[in-house]
Image: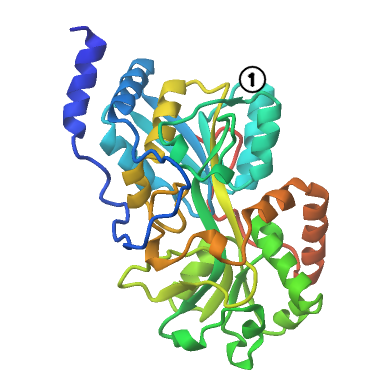
Amino acid sequence: MDEKRRKFLGYTGLAMGALASSFASNISASPARDGGGPVSTTVDPCALDDLYAEALDEGGRLVVYAGGDSPNGHEPLENAYRARFPGLDIRIVTDLSKYHDVRIDRQRALGRLECDVAHLQTLHDFDRWKSEGALLPFKPSAWDAIEPSYKDPDGHFVAVDVFAFANVFNIDAIAEQDAPRDAIDYLAPSLRNRLTLVYPHDDDALLLHYAYLEEDHGQRYVKRLLEQNIKWRRGTELAAADVGAGRAAATFGVAGPLQSPENARSRFLLPRNDRFVSWPQTGAIFAQARHKAAARLYMSWLLDKQVVIDRAFQWPPRMDVPVPGGYDPLDAYRTSHDDFRNFMSDRSLVESLKRRFKRLIGPVRGPNPTGVHGLYVA
């Protein structure tokens, strides 16, 4: 038996049954989405084993750039990967997607790309990177189970999560039946001095939400909202944390778990009537990746059916995984990820709206919430 195979078998024995306990496991028994055709139920274990062996032989290292606004926000995912694949190391650097994409482009121009994989909010980047030949095509075994609109037909990129921004309220401050859900609700006199919100000109998904607000409720809406004496935050995690800790009664334009933990003091609510923003958080492997086998393993594992279930937060990218909390598939609601994709592709519109809301609200204040700085960050 050669050394590579001996090492692989040894690590496999250590990894039996391992997935990090930090993943959420309280999954609703809501009906699975109709895939409209044959659906792969899980990643072929043999395929994972082969990729695992190749990743070990390659050196066992992987660097991922992940979009988010929470410091080390993907640490549970790092721990789960290491537990499942002993002998492999991973660093997932969480930073705002709008910083990661610039970082990636600068590194590519210098000829030394640090990350092997990125999963980001900036959907327009993936189309551009594909056209530039910057992405490595790869279709994991779960490919047929992924919602078609969440993936590139040529295999250059695919959703790893599906997120939506809506409302979060504190259950000790407001009864659920009285919680604000539509834009007009946030103008109630009872909510003055009790709201925390995120700067829309600091997050493109939130920027689209504010564009919806003005389209549906008039350009005076934001000026009326400002009369509520808002506490402005940089980063959706900080706004959600304010509500969870009781420092604010409610917020909108943030994500939250569809299945709330039992001890949570806040709840996520969709609007009753208004539109809301959703998008597939999209991942890809770079052609310049130094750890291609580990990158293929990571993307295959991340889209494994059980891993998708265990990581349940909002809507799954797979059609054969139930939506947590008894929610319907996203297409049952007033939201469109195509809206977001088209919005992100119109950079002149995006920049114009940023300037508008900067004039209305003021400049973004506060440090980068992730604390990540510099060009090479792993």
Mark 1 residue crowding within 10 angstroms, few (<14) / some (14–19) / many (20+): few
In the figure, is residue 50 to the left or right of 237?
A: left
- Amino acid found under the numbered disc labelled 1: Gly
Q: Residue furthest front?
A: 37
In the figure, is residue 58 to the left or right of 179?
A: left
Measuring 31% from the left and 42% from the top, which residue is drawn there?
A: 80
Q: Residue 331: x percent and y percent?
A: 56, 60
Q: Is residue 229 visible?
A: yes
Q: Residue 244: x percent and y percent?
A: 43, 73
Measuring 39% from the left and 29% from the top, which residue is drawn there?
A: 297
> In the displayed structure, would residue 368 be above or below residue 234?
above
Measuring 59% from the left and 49% from the top, which residue is drawn there?
A: 96
Q: Name the residue under label 1.
A: 111
- Please say which color scheme the image uses: rainbow
Q: Compare residues 68 and 375 and report the one nearer the observer.
A: 68
Secondary element at tag 1: loop
> In the displayed structure, would residue 130 be above or below residue 40?
above
Q: Compare residues 94 and 276 and report the one nearer the observer.
A: 276
Q: Residue 289: x percent and y percent?
A: 53, 23
Quarter of the image with the N terminus is top left
Measuring 60% from the left and 48% from the top, which residue is drawn there?
A: 121
Q: Compare residues 338 and 162 and report the one nearer the observer.
A: 338
